[in-house]
Amino acid sequence: MPLYLNEEQTMLRDAAQQFVGEAAPVSHMRGLRDANDATGFSRDLWKQFAEMGFTGILIPEGDGGLGLGHVEAGVVLEEIGRNLTPSPFLTTAVAAVEALKGSAQRDRWFPGILAGETVAALAIDERAKHGDAIAMKAERSGNGFMLTGAKQFVSHGHVADLLIVAARTAGSPEDEGGVTLFAVPKDAAGMTADPQRLADSSLAARIAFDGVAVDADAVIGDVDGGRAVLDTLLNAGRTGAAAEMLGVGGGAMDMTVQYLKERKQFGALIGSFQALQHRAAHQYSEMEVARAAVLKAQQLLDAGNDRATQAVSVAKAMAGLASTLAVQEGVQMHGGIGMTDEYDIGFYMKRGRVLAELFGDTNYHADALAQAAGY
């Protein structure tokens, strides 16, 4: 048993490992891709996630959930990453739940999430790369607001029941303040989604808001004070994406090591070649350092520590570097077949690339850490 997991967390890991490995291995993702599935994930599988209790990991016990933390959510996300399982778990059961926890909106949305019937999407980004600027307008109209603008890179946005939308109610796009978060239902008039395939065959939508009317109850947190809730959402999403990247990198590494033990060249197993042993050892070391960084971020978030945000940036950056190394080395050490569709190793590279960009890439977080240190 890993020393960093207690008995309950180890039981959860074992349950997640068995369930995800059997119900949604890489062949599950490949099947959805080959069928050109228009949803991007299996709704039946999402309900099975709920039956396992996974969708309620971060939902408080008073709201019907398990009341656990980011360490436990990360345990599940690592298995999702290891199996490349298409799932709305990260956006819905992690990021959206964290945003809704302190809001009256939780009474409306938590029951559906717990039942595996509700999917949430995060309409945050507006530019080609993740950033902090928010230009989309939310103007007062009647007893509510009218949303006008566009968002992109919205995972599951075309099929989500709930969209958490960041919009500007005051100030200019680069301002820290003046941001408000809204819970927008899928049937809101004036909202259109254009889904696009990403590198890993998942679907993310460009969403246009053409005077979408929402009432005042749709506000999550305070008007003009949504940045705090947005930061909570992003910290959860970034840490969760980092945990999923650990799974992606670990899955690629395991596949590569197994290949080194089976493939022969010049009459010898290629795993006996010292140069490849050194590269495999380097992969392992980098993944373990990243794992320590991710665990620290999870623990600080669970403790409500004021250093959590910086730890989250460290985790996201390091997980991005380590998983990228693992998938690139995996493809290269497989040789030419690593570039073919027949072998799964290429899928790990593609998923790792998408996760690296999600919620800010390594350069974004390195810059955030430098600015926080006064550079």
Image: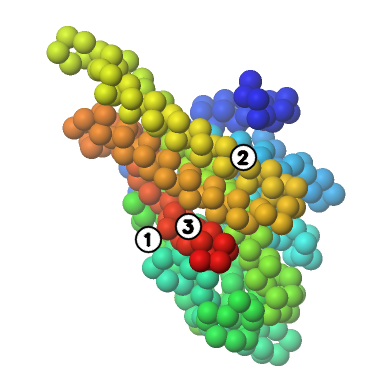
Vertically, is 235 above or below 89? below
- For residue 295, the mark is 2
At label 3, the amino acid type is: Ala
At label 2, the amino acid type is: Leu
Q: Secondary structure at mark 1?
A: strand
Image location of residue 272, percent across then percent down:
28, 14
Q: Residue 298 vs residue 270: left or right?
A: right
Image location of residue 148, percent across then percent down:
53, 83
Q: Label 2 crowding class (10 Å Cα cut-off): few <14, some 14-19, many 20+?
A: many
Image location of residue 260, percent across then percent down:
30, 20
Residue with the mark numbered 1: 196
* Mark 1 vs 2, N-terminal side: 1
| Colour scheme shown | rainbow
Image location of residue 67, percent across then percent down:
77, 44
Q: Secondary structure at mark 3?
A: helix
Whether tag 3 and tag 2 are in contact, CB under 8 A, the answer is: no
- For residue 86, the mark is none
